[in-house]
Image (cartoon, helix red, strand yellow):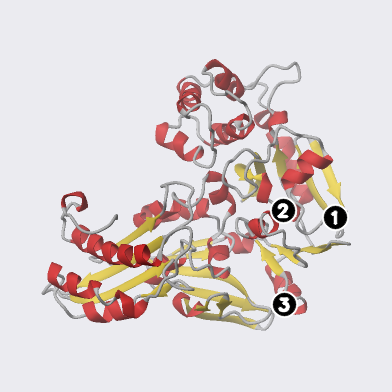
């Protein structure tokens, strides 16, 4: 069928032909299906009250991930298995071990956030048999609670990890082979188009089909993870049409590791990118751990963060500092360009009508270089960047600056290099005196704005301080023992 989306909801096969382009999974669950265990808290992917699991086939195997139903569009669900909190308990009412642990350790008070916590812990249950506290805390980054203080919830997770109870009735382990077979039958083999009074949604059958669709609909909104676009709908109430969904295209989810770097398909999520970068570029992997919560990282994509062109997107500055290149594709072919050249001005990118981001190549830092990324926010986790600085440095045998690339987010209308600062440092000795002199040149590169995240003065001072911090770290001086202005 090419006029309907099909997926599995808990144990039921669902076929939908009446779907709005921007209908969210949360609205579908609560309003159409009356599955009200999934809550609406923030409607922007922050609080985790709407957490559900999405299962999909990856290289022939069934994998489940926690996602935010409040910003997940229905058009992205074709060929998946949606699991809500109502599916966990046994038919006789016996609680799942994850649920029972929450009861035993008093992990719930008002109860509003509890289903979301349960689903996040259930996702961890499925992916890791013996998670340690760091894994547990990472899995719960995207879930907020105003009552318990989190410790009882973490203790519940630790108890399950210590003595994993029997899962004889676990609904996903028990039916895994059946779900795999059913999902194989649901995989799209041709383009799906659904038109309604609210507009049109399109699900391409291939990357070639995507290129053809965009040639015909150059103003279409492309949706991969919807972690940004979702807020256009839930917060700005924007009507989008046509909407083209690409999160199912395996060609855009490919990761190619080579000796000099790694190529990420535009549909590779932060979670999948982390698995590679943790070994190859630890500083960049550390940044990914601070992008949203686990649900956002499971949905958000590297390509989407680039394509949107946000001046406060987290991945472009460090990728620019590393010398990344982006591959654009259209029905007429492909072209490559440096990532820093992709961003032209606020809201403008070097992407022609009908083009889309197909992949990005990220070079590894060369041996002997220094690379660091600093994200400055009001709170450490789950917060949008105020200033993000990325630094790449190579020194010659004399200790002089041979090559330096400095890129910032939050300092201009686009992710931007500090060209004047770089020029002032190039060829000079890497010393405190050189750094102190270069601090005064930031005004030539950036004239930041003031907003609710930070004032222009704070941003400018922070940029200077991050350069000083980078210098101190490269020469081995503990930052906390070196006093300088502001915060690092």
Question: Alpha-carbon neighbours of circle 2 within 10 Å: few (<14), some, or many (≥20)?
Answer: many
- Looking at marks 2 and 3 on the same chain, the residue that comes earlier in the sequence is marked by 2
Question: At x 44% / y 73%, what residue is drawn?
Answer: 412
The residue under label 2 is: 73
Cα distance in 3D space between marks 3 and 1: 23 Å
Q: Mark 3 points at which residue?
A: 218
**Image position of 465 (left or right of 192):** left
Label 2, secondary structure: give it.
loop
Q: Residue 305 carries which label?
A: none
Q: Which of 396 and 262 is in front in this view?
A: 396
Q: For the point 52% across and 22% down, which residue is it?
A: 164
**Residue at x 22%, y 77% (from the top left corner):** 425
The residue identified by callout 1 is 4
Question: Disc 2 vs disc 1: Cβ atoms closer than 8 Å?
Answer: no
Q: Marks 2 and 1, how far apart in space? A: 14 Å
* Residue 357, position as x, y percentages in the image: 59, 71
Mark 1 or mark 3, which is nearer the start of the sequence?
1
Where residue 168 sits in the image (x, y, percent)? 65, 21
Category of crowding for the residue at label 1, using alpha-carbon neighbours closer than 10 angstroms: few (below 14), some (14–19), many (at least 20): some
Q: In this view, does 216 lie above or below 50?
A: below
On the image, which quarter does residue 387 sit in?
A: bottom left
Q: Residue at x 50, y 34 (%)?
A: 128
Label 3 or label 1, whichever lies nearer to me, is: 3
Instruction: Please identify, in this view, whether the residue under mark 2 or under mark 1 is nearer the observer.
Output: 2
């Amino acid at each position: 069928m090419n006029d309907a989306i099909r997926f599995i909801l808990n144990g039921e096969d669902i076929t939908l032909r009446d779907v709005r382009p921007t209908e969210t999974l949360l609205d579908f669950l609560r309003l159409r299906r009356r599955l009200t265990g999934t809550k609406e808290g923030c409607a922007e992917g922050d609080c985790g009250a709407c957490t559900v699991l999405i299962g999909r086939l990856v290289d022939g195997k069934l994998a489940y991930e926690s996602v935010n139903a409040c910003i997940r569009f229905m058009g992205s669900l074709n060929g998946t298995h949606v699991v809500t909190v109502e599916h966990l308990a046994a038919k006789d009412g016996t609680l799942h071990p994850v649920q029972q642990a929450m009861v035993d350790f008093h992990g719930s008070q008002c109860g509003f956030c509890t289903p979301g916590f349960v689903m996040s812990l259930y996702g961890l249950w499925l992916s890791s048999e013996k998670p340690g506290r760091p894994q547990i805390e990472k899995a719960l980054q995207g879930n907020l609670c105003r009552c318990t203080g989190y410790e009882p919830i973490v203790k519940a997770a630790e108890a399950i990890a210590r003595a994993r109870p029997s899962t004889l009735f676990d609904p996903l382990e028990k039916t895994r082979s059946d779900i795999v077979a059913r999902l194989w039958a649901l995989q799209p083999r041709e383009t799906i188009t659904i038109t309604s009074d609210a507009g049109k949604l399109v699900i391409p059958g291939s990357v070639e089909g995507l290129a053809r669709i965009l040639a015909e609909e150059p103003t279409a909104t492309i949706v991969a993870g919807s972690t940004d676009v979702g807020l256009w709908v839930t917060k700005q109430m924007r009507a989008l049409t046509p909407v083209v969904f690409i999160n199912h295209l395996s060609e855009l989810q490919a990761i190619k590791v080579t000796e000099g770097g790694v190529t990420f398909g535009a549909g590779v999520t932060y979670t999948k990118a982390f698995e590679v970068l943790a070994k190859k570029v630890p500083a960049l992997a550390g940044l990914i751990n601070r992008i949203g919560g686990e649900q956002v990282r499971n949905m958000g994509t590297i390509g989407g963060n680039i394509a949107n062109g946000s001046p406060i997107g987290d991945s472009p500055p460090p990728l620019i500092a590393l010398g990344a290149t982006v591959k654009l594709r259209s029905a007429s072919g492909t072209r490559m360009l440096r990532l820093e050249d992709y961003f032209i001005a606020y809201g403008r990118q070097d992407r022609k009508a009908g083009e889309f981001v197909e992949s990005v190549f990220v070079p590894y830092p060369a041996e002997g270089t220094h690379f660091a990324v600093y994200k400055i926010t009001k709170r450490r986790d789950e917060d949008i960047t105020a200033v993000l600085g990325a630094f790449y440095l190579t020194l010659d045998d004399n200790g002089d600056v041979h090559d330096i690339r400095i890129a910032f987010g939050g300092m201009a209308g686009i992710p931007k290099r500090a060209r004047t600062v770089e020029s002032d440092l190039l060829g000079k000795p890497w010393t405190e005196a050189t750094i102190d002199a270069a601090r005064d040149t930031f005004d030539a590169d950036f004239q930041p704005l003031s907003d609710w995240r930070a004032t222009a003065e704070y941003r400018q001072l922070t940029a200077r301080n991050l350069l000083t911090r980078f210098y101190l770290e490269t020469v081995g001086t503990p930052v906390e023992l070196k006093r300088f202005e502001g915060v690092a």
